[in-house]
Amino acid sequence: MSAAPPITQNPDIRFLGRLLGHVIRAYGGEKLYRQTEYIRSSSVDRARGVDGADLVDTGLEALSLDDTLDFVRGFMLFSMLANLAEDRQGVAAEPGADVASAIATLDSHGIGRDAVKALLDKALIVPVLTAHPTEVRRKSMIDHKNRISDLMRLKDAGLEETDNGEKIDEAICRQIALLWQTRPLRRERLYVQDEIENVLAYFRDTFLPVLPALYARWERVLGDRPHSFLRVGSWIGGDRDGNPFVQAPQLKFALARACEAALGYYLESLHALGAELSLSTELAKVPQAVLDLADRSGDTSPSRQDEPYRRALSGIYARLCATHQSLTGKLPPRPSSLTATAYGDPAEFRRDLVTVAQGLASEGGGALSTGGALGRLIRAVETFGFHLATLDMRQNSDVHERVVAELLKVAGVEDDYAGLDEYARIALLRRELANNRPLGSRFAEYSEETASELAIVHAAAEAHRTYGPQCITQYVISKAESVSDMLEVNILLKEAGLWRAANGEPPHAAIMAVPLFETIGDLENAPKVMSAYFGLPEISGLVRGRGHQEVMIGYSDSNKDGGYITSTWSLFQASTALAPVFEKAGAAMQLFHGRGGAVGRGGGSAFAAIQAQPHGTVQGRIRVTEQGEIIAAKFGTRDVAMTNLEAMTSATLLASLEPEKLSERDAARFANAMDSLSQTAFTAYRDLVYGTEGFKEFFRELTPIQEIAGLKIGSRPASRTKSTRIEDLRAIPWVFSWAQARVMLPGWYGVGHALAGFEDKALLTDMAQVWPFLKSALANLEMVLAKSDLGIAARYLPLVEDQAKAEELFGRIREGWGMAHDGLLTATGQSRLLEKNPALETSIRLRLPYIEPLNLLQIELLKRHRGGEDDPRIKEGIELSINAIATALRNSG
């Protein structure tokens, strides 16, 4: 095994780390600074293998409880600043992950820009932000970090002072001091409204300005203006699966606040344009359409009589103010003094903006109309409308079954819907969908659950009337297992007029029912379910008329169900098997990938993951969930957001248009090999996690799962039920807790057994080198193996009550890690982990010395907490350590 090269530290990390040291010394005192520096340097020495370092006192036992809290905060802040520095230096960027490079690659294959433009004309690419609770930092902390990023950008430009005359280095140090004195933990429980407000900050600060800027870049690359194929979605306020706190009021609040944010951005942009477009009729030729728009504005100010563009914009601004009041019920922050009527829809608003743009383009060769603030505003209106982001609805199929059963019973249609078999259910539901008579009645009494679900669909219908049909377009069905699961949603939509039957014509559904196939069994069954669904004449007509149908595939639960490699392969197989089903149905397939941040939940490089999708399954249409800490990591600053959104777009182009990389023979050989690997891995994983007596207790005592469940980091409960079974635990805390204990078991266990037991090592090496699917899977596996540390994980063993069982189970885990490590190196032809990825290797090795002391302190605090000590500082220290470890590991949830 080759020795890892010396770490070349990022200069930004050195700079920010030095300033953090100054802040700790200034605000924490000399003693804390010296303790922190001693612990840091001794940990670095141990990580680097310095002779005798293991014998040196760690310095942790000398920390009092107060010192511990301060020390953990210091290491957490270092990791946060290191993340910022790496993102700035492009560690997150990948070679070729931009649209210009993708077009060049396609051109090398003989695929020209006409093909790219044709794809983009029908494309849809959507990152969907969700509220899954793995973002442990308060937004105040993220805001300070982003201000540091802005200041570092000024420093890059060679400036020494801010616009306010403050020295940039001093301003950065000031922000770090503010970070040091900002409470990192939430004291109050996070409510759905809080999650909505948190995510709106990303829309306002990042997506609204970034997407128009990206489109302007792509217009230059393409030599043409594509339609707005890259949009943004959200689950926050619409995802009710297992979250009793999301009901109709939360849905309405999310949509209203999103509309308010979009209109507020447009009003600010118009106000700035009004100051900029000072063209005078004495010096410019102004088309009649602009003059007419100016005359209709009602702006009669003498100072602007020769400035038709300003007067036209005054009228547009006044109409948008009226729109703001009409849609939100509030006056905008800067109301207009003019009287105006509200816009009927975003298209009407856009038409007025285009009239102004065409006027500017009418002379001077269009110099004033190419790009600029007006062009960006028009693009924003096309992309965000009045709704800002499409809000998905989501609920569990079990809830739909109960609600529909009650509706049918109360209406006198069927007393025992739950007792019907699948064929009888389908027949009954089809009969009900063939007419527009609602089952519900305002005179009937319903259970609280049914009343809540009916209120939700009626709120969705009201939203369509208010904000336009793009505000909600998908209804995701968790635990979708059958055709009736999908028809039940259409029944509920019909109750609000969102499904309309038409005599002799295909029905109209304003919102699409989207099945979510989550478990290994669900994924295997997906093609059969979709084939049967498309086989219904009314559904066939509906889907053909729409042109596409979405299917969501879940990474988290399939991983918890079957382990990493089986989950990954099952997702690949399901996507492959669905493609001909959609082709036969005459509909484009739109896959919605339910990915998380951790490798065990589909995390890792999105650029590589999209390209690794089965050939022919992307087709320019893809949606991907973004959750928890990944939202801040990928979209926390404009520069980082542009990098990640461009990577997602370029990967979609390549996955959709590049020729198949494998021959049919290789594809068949590789698939057979993966079937064997997957089965071996599945057996090993299931045997450990679900087939070993005492494993549930071992997991709950070894990891801080109990303490994570108590963190105030999300509105959703950690478990779907009050059961302690692993099956009922949500995938997010399952993965998150293993990461905290540095085991990261969901990201690798079982793979080692598969690699070790596979006899044809030459075939395995060939697959790892030429098959994008396996290359991506192994790259993610390699990352999680590098971030795990079973030496530290072993220190958690005393937390387990049954020590004999703990030693037995941990021995199996250690053996599995060793097999995964050795098998990966053999398959990839490396002598050490990350040998071929020096940037990631450096990033992880830099962090390890800062994580080890946090783990050791966490273990000690967990012992004291579980031993009955009730000092509130112990609980706070545990929560701080969870925060700090998650920050250092980055994609741990």
Image (cartoon, rainbow, N blue to C red):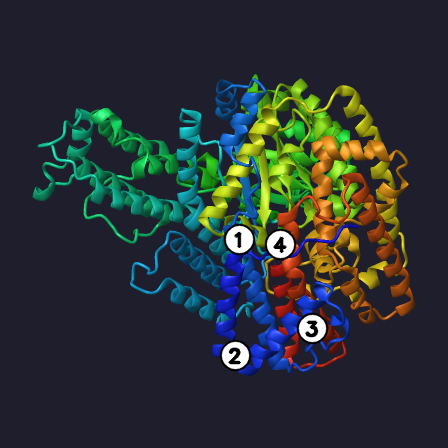
Residue type marked 3: Leu
Q: Amino acid at mark 1?
A: Ala
Tag 4, which secondary structure?
helix
| Eye-nearest disc, 1 or 3 | 3
Q: Nearer the viewer, mark 1 or mark 4?
A: 4
Residue on which the image places disc 3: 857
Please state which of the two labelled residues, at mark 4 or mark 3, is closer to the viewer.
4
Q: Earlier in the sequence, mark 2 or mark 1?
A: 2
Comes first in the chain, label 1 or label 3: 1
In front: 808, or 250? 808
The Cα atoms of the two marked residues, 4 and 2, are separated by 28 Å
Q: Residues within 10 Å of mark 4 (few under 14, many from 20)?
A: some
Which dot, 4 or 2, sits closer to the camera?
4
Badge count: 4
At numbered mark 2, what does the secondary structure look like: helix, strand or loop? helix
Q: Earlier in the sequence, mark 4 or mark 3?
A: 4
Residue 551 lies in what quarter of the image?
top right
Q: Are marks 1 and 3 in contact (CB under 8 Å)?
A: no
Place of residue 155 in the rendered image (x, y in percent of width and height, measured from the top left):
40, 56
At a point 29% along the width and 33% down the height, the residue shown is: 353
What residue is shown with label 4?
843
Q: CA distance from mark 2 to mark 1?
A: 28 Å
Earlier sequence position, callout 2 versus callout 3: 2
CA–CA distance in space, label 2 to label 3: 19 Å
Residue 546 in sight here: yes
Give the residue displayed 67% in from the left and 50% down from the top: 598
Instruction: Please give the residue where the numbered disc 1 appears in the rendered image.
Output: 632
* Badge number at residue 28: 2
Type of amino acid under label 2: Gly
Are dots 4 and 2 in contact, CB under 8 Å?
no
Mark 2 and 3 residues: CB-CB less than 8 Å, in contact? no
Q: With respect to residue 580, does 98 lie above or below?
A: below
